[in-house]
Image (spheres, grey):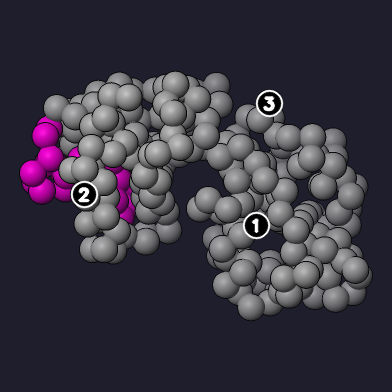
Amino acid sequence: MAKLNIVGVGPGSPDYVTPAARKAVAQAQIVIGAQRSLDLFASEVNGETLILTAKNLHEALKYAAESLNSGKNVALLSTGDPGFSGLLHTVLESGLFNAENITVTPGVSSIQACAAKIALNWDTTCLFTFHEGNVTAEDKNHLLTCVKNNKNVMLLPDSRAFPPKEIATFLITSGVEKKIPVYICENLTLENEKITSSTLEKISAQSFVPLCVMVIKPNSK
């Protein structure tokens, strides 16, 4: 039975691509992914490639489903880990695939890379993703509750709908102490990686690149 393998490609550096991911790509007849993801597997791709963009996502998934029906294995490249703000959710919600046709090859997420860079134990940390503009009042209130309850928070901001400066401003105007420590990790694992250690107050006046992770740390442990 042909399979759709949703492959986590890590946070960006080839050093963080797992051997399992490389093997999955090498075994696929069709590999679909953003250009920067495809570039990570230049020596493994043996079959057809399709460049994935925000505009052709639905068409690419339809093509993947048609390819499975014709007996071809497909690798769908997902930045970071497919299960956290990755393509697994999109695939499951599309209604184009049967569960028995889907496999997932996990990858290193930017959340994991960020936690490692700042030596943060994240098993009790509150995790959020605001990617794709998914910013609801309920999510904001949940974020506020976590911070006010002295829980560390790791989140993926949306550079347009809810960037770090607006997140910081929202928390401060909602009564959170403005001196709470904050880390912004930009371009993790890449040559231009940058880690900023600051406070909510200072972050509220700064801008950052879209590829970043924000850590709010009311709990110093």
Give amino acid for label 3: Asp
The quadrant where residue 185 appears: top left
The correct choice, above or below, for 144 with respect to 123 in the image is below
Question: Who is closer to the viewer here, 159 or 121?
Answer: 121
Q: Which residue is mark 1?
A: 52
Q: Are the residues flagged by discs 2 and 3 in contact, CB closer than 8 Å?
A: no
Q: Which residue is mark 2?
A: 144
In screen coordinates, is 54 left or right of 64? left
Gap between marks 1 and 2, in whole Å? 35 Å
Pair 1/3: label in front: 3
Pair 1/2: label in front: 2
Give amino acid for label 1: Leu
Q: Position of residue 100 (x, y in %)?
A: 78, 70
Whether residue 56 is visible: no
In screen coordinates, is 151 left or right of 69? left
The quadrant where residue 92 appears: bottom right
Describe the element under mark 3 as helix, strand or loop: helix
Pair 2/3: label in front: 2
Identity of the residue drawn at 52% across and 30% down: 113
Question: Who is closer to the viewer here, 18 or 157?
Answer: 18
Q: Earlier in the sequence, mark 1 or mark 3?
A: 3
Q: Are the residues flagged by discs 1 and 2 in contact, CB closer than 8 Å?
A: no
Q: Which residue is mark 3?
A: 15
Q: Is residue 37 rendered magenta in the image? A: no
Identity of the residue drawn at 21% across and 49% down: 144
Q: Position of residue 86 (x, y in %)?
A: 56, 53
| Numbered range of the magenta stretch | 159-178
The correct choice, above or below, for 155 with respect to 136 in the image is above
Q: Is residue 170 rendered magenta in the image? A: yes
Q: Position of residue 146 (x, y in %)?
A: 26, 46
Q: Position of residue 173 (x, y in %)?
A: 8, 46
Q: Residues within 10 Å of mark 1 (few under 14, many from 20)?
A: many
